[in-house]
Amino acid sequence: LHPRPEEREERLYWHAARYRLLREEEDLEALLSLTDARERVLPGLVPLGLLPRKRPELARAYPLEEVLRSGWKEAVALRLAEIPPLRVEVLGGFRVRNPLGGVELKGKAREVFALLLLGLPREEVAYALWPDLSEEAALNNLYVWLNRLRKALEPWGLPTYLDEEGLRHLACDLHALEEALWREDAEAAFALYREPLFPGLDHPLLDRKREAVFHRVRALFLQKGEPRYLERLLELDPLDEEALLPLVEGCLARGQRARALAHLERYRKKLWEELGERPPPRVEALFRRLSG
C-alpha cells in the first residue's frame, strides 16, 4: 500500500483497502472515526462478509436482503424488526413470498401451511393430516414438516414467521378478505375474492373453509344488491336465482330491457345444459314477458 494519505477522503479508502487486505480491526476503527456517518459508510467500502463476526452491529447499514442472505444470525437478529411480513396469496392462486423472493411449497408442506393459515393448533393439524396414526406419531410427522417449512420460509435461521403458536407476521389476502367481510366492505371483498381458494389442495377442512367464505361473500353481495356484485355472483354460479332476479329487476328499473333479457337467456341456457331443466315459473314468466 501507499503511505497513509493526509486527505480525509483518501484516508477512508486507504484504511478500507488496508482492512480488506490485512483484516486488522485498527483500520476498521480508524475508518469509522473518520466520519460522523460511522458504520453507515461501510457498505460502500467493505463487503459485508469481511466484517468481524463479533461486531454484528456494523451490519445495520447494509441492505436487509444482503444481511438475510449472509447467514449471519447475530446481524439478522438486530434487524428482525425491519423484516417485512410474509406475503401470502391463496385466493385464485397459491403464492408465498418472503423478502428474498418466492417460496416454493409443494405437497405436504403446502398442506401444513394451509392448515396453519386457518389458525388451527398443531395438534389439530397433525390429526387432520395423519388421522390413522397415534397422536405421538402424527405430531412427530408434523414436526418434521414444520422444520422443512421453517427452512423454506426463514432461510436466515431465526424465527420470523413460524413459532410455537403457528404462523405470524403475515400479509395474507384471505385474512384481508375476512376482515372486509367482517366490516361489510363489499368493495374490498369484490376486489379480493377470487376462486379457487387454496387451489390444488384437497382436504375436508379446506373444503369447509371454501364453502364458508363463499357463502359470506354471497350474503354480502346479495345484501348490497349492486349490479356488479350480482353479476359477479352469476359468474361464480350462473344458476344463482337469488342473484339473477334482483339483477334483472334492476336492469328493468333502469330501462335496460335488452340487458335484462340477455341475463335471463344465459340463465335458461345454462340450466338446460347442466341440469336438463326449465326455469322455475317466476323466471320463465319474466322471460316470456320480456321476449314478447
Image: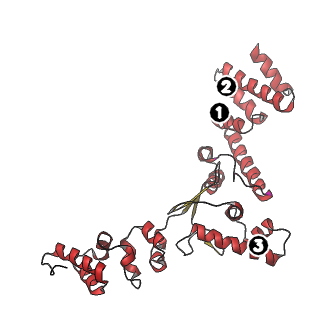
The dot on residue 251 is 2
Circles 3 and 1: CB atoms closer than 8 Å: no
| Percent x, y of residue 129 | 78, 66
Is residue 86 among the parts visible in the rendering?
yes
Q: Residues within 10 Å of mark 3 (few under 14, many from 20)?
A: few
Is residue 16 positioned above or below 277 on the image? below
To which quarter of the image does residue 242 belong? top right
Task: Please identify the residue farthest to the top as the structure is shown.
Answer: 292
Label 1, residues with CA under 10 Å away: few <14, some 14-19, many ≥20 = some
Disc 3 designates what residue? 123
Q: Quadrant of the N terminus?
A: bottom left
Q: Secondary structure at mark 3?
A: helix
Q: Earlier in the sequence, mark 2 or mark 1?
A: 1
Q: Earlier in the sequence, mark 3 or mark 1?
A: 3
Q: At 75% across and 68% down in the image, what residue appears?
A: 125
Instruction: Residue type at mark 1: give it.
Output: Pro
